């Protein structure tokens, strides 16, 4: 998690430097493939790869996947001081708390490689997809997501202007 976030920070700093004063490095869009950006890429992709392969070989996916939420929490802590971004307590702290609770709960109650694990095939997956609990959860998710997406679509110009006014940390409260 720390190498991933550190790599993202290096990449963002490289992009910010490129936007402030264009350099001689080859570009893909706004990204300058500078040594700093490439070093960040190696930290994001190359360094964690061997550990991830080993972890996925030794532990169940249902136990490891929720731990990716830890990367978001590390980003929440590291981005403001290293990138000069303003922390927005209202959405950032609440979202980080939800991620932390979800990460802890799914790790505690997830499958720890017990012998009670059920073999998953297409028939079992379809059975679970038609389960009433899953369908209720899916409908609840849709009731939250659809209005959110409509709201963002309607307010897209205001969101764009706010992001352009403060690209490092756009204000969210007035949107």
Image: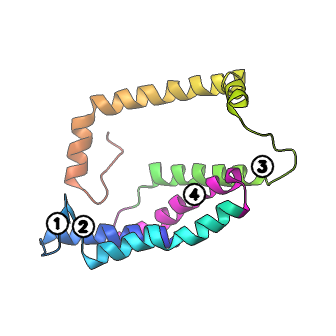
Residue at point 62%, 53% (across, down): 65
- Left or right: 78 as drawn, with respect to 121: left
Gap between marks 1 and 2, in whole Å?
Answer: 6 Å
From the image, tell me which residue sits under label 2: 15
Give the quadrant of residue 120: top right
Gap between marks 1 and 3, in whole Å?
Answer: 46 Å
For residue 106, above or below residue 137 = below
Residue at point 57%, 22% (across, down): 139
Q: Position of residue 83 (x, y in %)?
A: 34, 70
Q: What element carries label 4?
A: helix
Q: Position of residue 110 (x, y in %)?
A: 75, 49
Give the quadrant of residue 100: bottom right
From the image, tell me which residue sits under label 4: 68
From the image, tell me which residue sits under label 1: 19
Check the picture and name the quadrant holding the N terminus: bottom right
For residue 5, above or below residue 148 = below
From the image, tell me which residue sits under label 3: 109
Return the disc, 1 or 3, that comes first in the chain's sequence.
1
Return the disc, 1 or 4, that comes first in the chain's sequence.
1
Give the quadrant of residue 147: top left
Residue 120 is tagged as none
Q: Is mark 3 on a helix, strand or loop?
A: helix
């Amino acid at each position: 998690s720390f190498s991933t976030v550190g790599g993202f920070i290096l990449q963002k700093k490289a992009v910010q430097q490129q936007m402030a004063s264009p350099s001689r490095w080859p570009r893909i869009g706004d990204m300058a493939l500078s040594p700093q950006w490439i070093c960040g890429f190696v930290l994001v992709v190359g360094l964690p790869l061997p550990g991830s392969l080993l972890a996925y070989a030794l532990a169940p996916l249902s136990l490891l996947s929720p731990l990716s939420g830890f990367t978001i929490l590390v980003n929440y802590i590291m981005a403001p001081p290293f990138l000069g971004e303003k922390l927005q307590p209202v959405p950032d702290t609440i979202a980080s708390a939800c991620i932390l609770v979800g990460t802890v709960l799914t790790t505690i109650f997830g499958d720890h490689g017990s012998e009670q694990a059920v073999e998953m095939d297409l028939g079992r997956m379809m059975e679970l997809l038609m389960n009433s609990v899953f369908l209720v959860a899916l409908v609840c998710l849709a009731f939250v997501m659809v209005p959110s997406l409509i709201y963002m679509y309607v307010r897209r110009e205001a969101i764009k202007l706010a992001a352009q006014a403060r690209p490092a940390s756009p204000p969210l409260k007035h949107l």
